Structure formats: structure tokens, C-alpha cells
Image (spheres, rainbow, N blue to C red):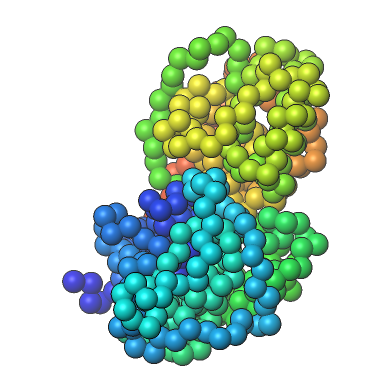
Amino acid sequence: MKENLPKVLMLGWEFPPIINGGLGVACHDLSSAMSKFADITMVVPKSSLEFKTGKVKLVGANHMNLASLPNYSVSKEMPFNLHSIPVDLDPYYTSSSTDGKVSSGFYNEGKTGSQTGQFDIENLYGGDVIKKVVQFSDIAAAYASTVDFDVIHAHDWMTMIAGMRIKEQTGKPLVMHIHSLEVDRSGPQSKGWVYDLEKQGMEYADMLMPVSNFTAENIHQYYGIKKEKMSVVHNGSVAVPAYKSKKSFKEKTVLFVGRLTRQKGPEKFLDIAARVLEKDPNVRFVMAGTGDYFKSMLEQSSYKHIGNRFHMTGFLNSEKLRHLFSISDVYCMPSVSEPFGLSAVEAAQFGIPCVISKQSGVSEVLKGALTFDHWDIHKAADHILSLLNDQIFRKKIVSDAYQNLDNITWDISAQKIMRSYALNNFIN
């Protein structure tokens, strides 16, 4: 069927519809685009048998009969002297992160009568995550011994152990796609086991594919890896049908979408809102998302006496998010450290002018957006006020950003990956 195409074994941690977070959506859209140029097998811990993936072969560890896998064995020790720490870890914006379920099991033994049973993983990010990561690596390595492929392509730290084991057993080149780093999520001083795993994994890989030059610089600065080993592949986007909806209020609207964590800078958005409202009280600020900062943001909006103009929605599905885009006048992304920032691209698709942090990958490709250093709330507020009150300026910014969208596609990302494979002799 695709006999002459290069064969890529991809390793992911989440995939729609199990999780519709940033990593899962990126893995889905990228693998779909790459399937035009390569034979893609995507191995993930948990998949839905009903979900159709086009030309991509989706393999979920939760559907494998582990007893039938040759060379399958359970690791007795943690790799690299990593310590197993039970932790409720949610590094990506996900719809399942609030369900409160934590899987205490590592694998389920005895249901099928086999010695090893089936991989039983309920919450991908909750509980003892490192055990789940190691267990997945055992399964992925055993599965890899049954298939033919040219390149191993792993996505982020959760799949790094699996990628390293498969490279070790096959000698095939290992590419690590870096969507997010521990130093993005927890700050440059973070030196825990996730950082250690990322560092060792990226050192062991044959090539790194960070999603932006910003991320490449962080890898070089904080992990000590040479840029010559990297090929930057900016994220793409899928065009969505944009529309405008009628508001139920007369004030103009400024929107924030993302996890309410340090990395996304929600407290900066609150400070920017307070600054704008000092000069123009006829503006509403909407914060869509959930996370550790939710309660704090709610309290601080009250302390700043802007609660009547500052609205927090909690988690919203894609349909409700698009409705918010359709009624918003400005999009603001004040991230402290943002490897890419796909939400800004989505806003631009809806014809919303964007005010985004310079500490983001998307600022490299969405050049029509207005930018500011994440700590400079005064400049961000001035940008927002200009866009709300100067319609000629607003139209220019919208037009400039809209033109950038032609160069932010998954097909372009996929073609760059295939060229990098070829230039490094990973494929013929």
C-alpha cells in the first residue's frame, strides 16, 4: 500500500479523543500530515478503537495482549537512578485533568488469566507517573521488536525512555520532538527527575526537533546541548471555520485561554486587566481555563476591585472556546515561557488581533501580532488599548497576522521533518 515510503515509529503519550490537550492534538495533526510522505505507526499508552486516524496506524498499549508480545518483560528497576514519586502531574492542558481519578495500578494482573495481563492506565498524568512511563517503555520496546521501521520519533519526556530502549535494541536513529520542557513548566531552577530524564534523553537522541527557536535556545542554555543537533520545526495549525457571534453585553472583550499555571502567566493577565481598566472601564476580561492558580486569580480580581469586569470560565470544550473567540476583540497571551502557543494562531484565524509575550515560539511565526516582554504589563496594556480604540490600527494588525497563517500549517511542518530525516541519512 505504501511500500516505498519511509517507515516512522512514533511514540506519543496522549492522542485524541482520549485527551484533547495541546500535546495530543499536535501529535494527531502532525502524524496525519506526515502520513502523506511516510508510513506512520503511532504508539500511545491509551487509544480508542472507535477513533479513525486516516492513514496513521494508531496502536494503544491498553489494547495489547501483553502475554502475546515477544521479548516483553517488566522492568525491575527505575532507569537512570530516578526515584518513583507519586504526584498529580498535569503538564498539558487536558480535558481529563479535572476528573479526580488517579490510577494506582501499574498494570492489571489476572483479568485475562495471563501472567502479565493488560496495561491498565486510567489517568495519564495522575498518580505514580514515572511507573507508567517505565511500563509504557517496556511495552513499546517489545512491540517495536515485531515491526519494521526506519526512524524512531518520540514526543516529549514521557516517551524518552521508550525511545532510548528502542534505539538501543535496534540501532535505528532516534528523533526527539520537544513540545515542552521542565524549565518551561517549573522555571529554570527546576532540577528534578523530569529535568534529569529530559537531559539524558536529549543527549542520547540523534536529533532534536524543538517546536521553536525559543525552545531550542532553552535546550542549549539549560541543558547544555549544541544547537547543531537541533532542527527547529514550528507547529502548524488546522484551519477552522471562523465566525462572529453577537455579544450579550456592550463592552469590548479581551480573552486569555490556557492552563492557570505559572508558565502561562495568568497573574500577568490580571495585572494587565487592572491597568487597562484604569484607563477604560468599558472592557471585559475573560480567562478561560483551569489550573493551580484558579482560586488565587478569583481572589485577586476581587482584591483589585475588578471582579465585575473579570470573568473566569473554568474548563471549556472546543465548541465553547470557539464561541469565545467569536465574540472577543483582543487576544492576550502573557506566557512566562511558551514553547509555541497555538491558541494565538486560533485567535488569528478568527480575525482577533493578538498581544503576545516575546517569550513564546508563536511570536516567531505570527509576526503580525503585537509583542511584549512578559514582565512589561504596561506595554501589554498600551497595546490592548490601542487595538480597542484605533480601528485603522486594529485592521492592519489583523490583516498582517492573517497573512502569516499561510505559513503556519502542519504540511509545512511535516515536509521540514522529512527533509531533516533525509539530510541526516535517517531515510533513503
Up-down relation of residue 217 to residue 402 (above or below):
below
Question: Residue 221 occupies which quadrant of the picture?
Answer: bottom right
The foreground one among 406 and 15 is: 15
Residue at the extreme left:
1
Q: Estimate the x, y position of residue 39 in percent, counting from the top left.
A: 31, 71
**Residue shown at the point (58%, 46%) measured from the top left:** 341
The answer to whether 234 appears left or right of 214 in the picture is left
**Residue shown at the point (71%, 29%) measured from the top left:** 298
Quadrant that contains the C terminus: bottom left
The foreground one among 343 and 302 is: 302
Q: Estimate the x, y position of residue 110 in percent, counting from the top left.
A: 37, 76
**Residue shown at the point (50%, 12%) measured from the top left:** 248
**Residue shown at the point (68%, 55%) measured from the top left:** 185
Residue 298 shows in the view: yes
Q: Estimate the x, y position of residue 105 in percent, counting from the top left.
A: 50, 68
The answer to whether 246 appears left or right of 366 in the picture is left
Question: Residue 46 occupies which quadrant of the picture?
Answer: bottom left
Q: Estimate the x, y position of residue 367 in percent, counting from the top left.
A: 60, 42
Residue 226 shows in the view: no
